Image (spheres, rainbow, N blue to C red):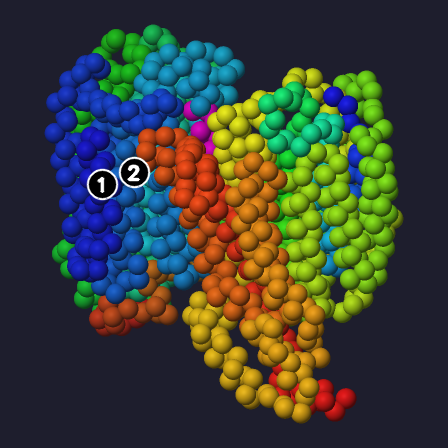
Amino acid sequence: MLIVLMVFAVAALAMLPLARALGRRVFAVAALVPLGAFVHTVLQAPAVLAGDAAALPVERWTWIAELSLTLDVRMDTLSWVLALVVTGVGSLVLLYCAAYFGDDERGLGRFAAVLLAFAGAMYGLVIADDVYLLFVLWEATSVFSYLLIGHYTHRRASRGAALQALVTTTLGGLLMLVGLVLLAVQAGTSSLTAILADLPPGPLTTAAVMLVLVGALSKSAIVPLHFWLPGAMAAPTPVSAYLHAAAMVKAGIYLIMRFAPAGVEVAGWREVLVVLGVATLLLGGWAALKQTDLKLLLAYGTVSQLGLLVVVAGFGTRDTALAAIALLLAHALFKAALFLIVGIIDHEAGTRDLRKLSGLGRRLPWLAGLTALALASMAGLPPLIGFVAKETALFALLSAATGGAGGPGGAPLDAAGQAWAAVALGGVVVGSVLTVAYSIRFFWGAFARKPGVDEVTGLAGATPGFVLAPAVLAVASLALGPLASVVGTGVAGYPALFPSSGEKTYALALWHGLTPELGLSVLIVVLGALLFAAREPLVRLQKRVAREYTASDAYWDAMGAVDRLAVRVTGLTQRGSLPFYLGVILIVFIGVTTTGLLLDRTWPAELRLWDHPAQLAIGTVMIIAAIAATQAQKRFAALVVVGVTGFGMSATFALQGAPDLALTQVLVEVVTLIAFVLVLRRLPARLGDKHGSSHRLMRAAIGIGVGTVMAVVAIVVAGARVDAPISLDWPAAAYEQGHGRNTVNVALVDLRGWDTMGELAVVIAAATGVASLLFLRSRGDDPRRIGRAAVQQRIAQRLDRVRDLGDPGEQRNAWILAGPTLDPRHRSILLEVVVRLTFHAIIVISLYLLFAGHNLPGGGFVGGLVAGLALVARYLAGGRYELGAALPLGAGTVLGTGLIIAAGAALVPVLLGQPPLTSTYWEGEVWLLGEVEFVSSTIFDIGVYLVVVGLVLDVLRSLGAEVDRQGGDELAPSARREGNIR
Amino acid sequence: MTVSLVLVVVMAALIACGVYLLLERSLTRVVLGFLLLGNGVNLLILIMGGPAGFAPIYDESLDPAAYNDPLPQALILTAIVITFAVSAFLLALIYRSWRLANADDVADDADDVALRAGTVTMPLEEVAPDAGDTDFPVEDAEPMRADAAGEGTR
């Protein structure tokens, strides 16, 4: 059986390419899959019908062992009958599709694939023995139904109906999941059979079963969740025939029948199902009587019949069980046939409106004949299977109401049970009267000649292939009536699950003699016919009592309310103002943290004022600078005072015993300052001209609040530290394992190398972000593609063009390569000379810092920043051409090389069977250099060095050179002349 | 473990001023606030490292507790460089915003404002089961329909 499921899945996927090749004939291929499954199911008959619960076909497959999820399937009589229905009707409907659709139908392959996948999911659903598998397939059918209802994606009504069906059934499905989980947890197993075999009475079980019922009732379109089914008629008619008549809506009935033997003991089960079932039965039948669209007539008829099934299936005696399974079978046959016939009528006549159809019976007499068969079964006329099933239902309810067997152990029901049986019987009788009436209305509407309506013409397409599927179904309805005893044998396993009195039990048969239920049947047919005859006064009555407000309206009101609530909540919380969001976050932070601090009592016993008196002086300067930054009105002033806090940080680091930090902070501060200047030169000098500064007090309060909270946090957290820090061992570990005396550097490249790896990734991402914000198309100025020689050539050309020998600046010696490209007013001979003299020395120093960093303050970060500063100097002195000449490589290349080297250093040990980033140590005599020590983590540090250089280069290229280019403030002949005039 | 009060006060001041600037609308002030906040948080990490000590350059003769804690130092070093990278990115954003909109401030999101003002309506997909009485409406007439010799009674 699992293999059958597998075939469904694979075949569904194969439909898309097949449909492209075969067109609508793909459905004929698709029909083979459920046909095969049907045959496979038929072949299971001996095992299923043997009546031995231990010998039923069972397959188990562990799916996710950790969650004890299993793919368990089991085929007992109920599953077997439903599997036959699902696969049998499925193959016929697919065959029918081949005639229904055209080759140029939109989304043909998708439709075929989804319909086949639905058939597979439905087949799996009825044989699943694991509640979670059941739920997964249950939801799968909902999703496939959504896709099938929405097949006409370009029609608004289709999309809306699809969504409505999905929301309704999924809502029920989720509640069902809760119920199933409760049951599975309570039972300690997820096996459906095991759970139902031992359902302990109690409020938990009641709640769980009721939740499961919500799922079942929503799926089977029972009041008050029935409205999605008429809406689902927006689907192509084959879908309506299969999903919304034969298969999917039966999933809920299946679940009720599956639970019924145990569930009928649960408090409220019978009451809920009888009340809702009868309500649905009557409401559906009443609504069907006023429909003018044949398909909607059938849809409301289906709602009504599903109500009938819920009443009978849920009532829970042996005889109602027999009636329920017979009704289910009969309904699948006649309702699918009728839908398919409506499809043929629609296809041929171009309408389903019974007010526009006339004379069809004369033109398509055989179609009328088939319709009559199916309708007779629906109305419960002999000798069709529908008659047998309805007789059984009437007998079962009548017998239960009058003290027949039905209770535990085959005893009569108690008084309440008998009363409910009477209610159910009354409902079924009235409902059946309505059924008879709308059955006749259907036949009259589709086939009769109506005065004043043009007769239908042009019915060429009703080919035998088209009619085959409904014909098989209608004839089966006819054939199974006389064969009722065979049917009875086939389904006998299901009613046997209920207690029986042990006497001779009721069996399916056409003729039971002149029984009370036969009398009821006759009464029903007569009343139904009269009701149809009185259709015109009836229509007037229906118009008068028409409800203003339907369940579907309630659904749309609920959906609209959800949308409006969402808009309200969004409008309330999403103010669109970033400062507002940030303020809210910070206020929450202050509130939560303050609460935590107030509850905490670990305050440090003592505070020291300072580590070093100089901290006081430095700190005072930093505080003043920070406050000044908040008040500054000019960009550069604000920048400078923020820079002061940075240099203050550096001094603090130095005092605290962190030379690496002090160095890094100074260097970063310089580079940041320059980067800011590069950008801010393009912006107006004054800050906040547009919006000014608002909510000053509020912001100050939040700022002071956060600062205060952080101060208290620092004191409390430090006070909470009682254990010796882990880093006490670091200096020795760094020296002995990492072979470096500078603990911080060894920590970065060795002990905590992975952290640094992550940091490099962040740096590269940020650098890439900078470049992508500046270089809109490509790195047009990428010197990689130009080369040093070409740069020099371009400079020379440029020089020729702009040369003005009258300018004394031109006679100056070119201390730097691209100096002459600059406007003489922007040149500083002093800067050029200094840069010329120091550039190479700075690079050497940066390399020294890189390699010495393992034992002394320095390392890749510091070295890289120093090298970056050298590049900054070249750029400041000579502009972007100078920068290109100084390092004729793209920033991306440098960054990438750095990352590759770092990653390589991390990964090479892996190739040698070591953990990543394991370092190795060499020591030896090298010619000229003397004794040399080398630690492999230095290679990692070189990667860091390159990434940092790349970052600075990227900033210079983007915020410097590219901003220059976009600003166009380079030396241009016109600009230059203007300059001379001034 | 005790903390240096001066450092705590400086840290609080940096964070307070940083937050104040961060809540501004001017992007430049936001970035400056980010820098102040970054400095403040680095200081916080440094405070967590305990009292001042020797630079963590290994010396066999020293007691391990005599060094300033190297672990927060490593964290701060990383943080300094990342702060620089991120502020470079923010600068690029400012520049871009200036080039595109001639503005370096944070504007309110227009869609959110419209939503709050109630000028946005949510479209609903509607169900109209009676909308058509056929699967084969004329607007998507197919060749198959053309075969059928007429429109019936329509």
Q: Are marks 1 and 2 in contact (CB under 8 Å)?
A: yes
Above or below for A536 versus A171? below
Instruction: Give the chain of mark 2.
Output: A
> Residue A726: percent from the left, percent from the top?
60, 22
Q: Which mark is residue A379?
A: none
In the picture of the structure, the residue carrying the numbered disc 2 is: A121
Please tell me which residue lies in front, A832 or A449. A832
Q: Amino acid at mark 2?
A: Ala
> Residue B23: percent from the left, percent from the top?
76, 51
Q: Amino acid at mark 1?
A: Phe
The residue shown at (46%, 50%) is: A898
> Residue A813: percent from the left, percent from the top?
62, 78
Above or below for A114 versus A380? below
Which quadrant holds the N terminus of chain A? top left
Above or below for B152 versus A3? below
- Sooner in the amino-acid sequence: mark 1 or mark 2: 1
The residue shown at (25%, 8%) is: A502
Above or below for A359 versus A474? below
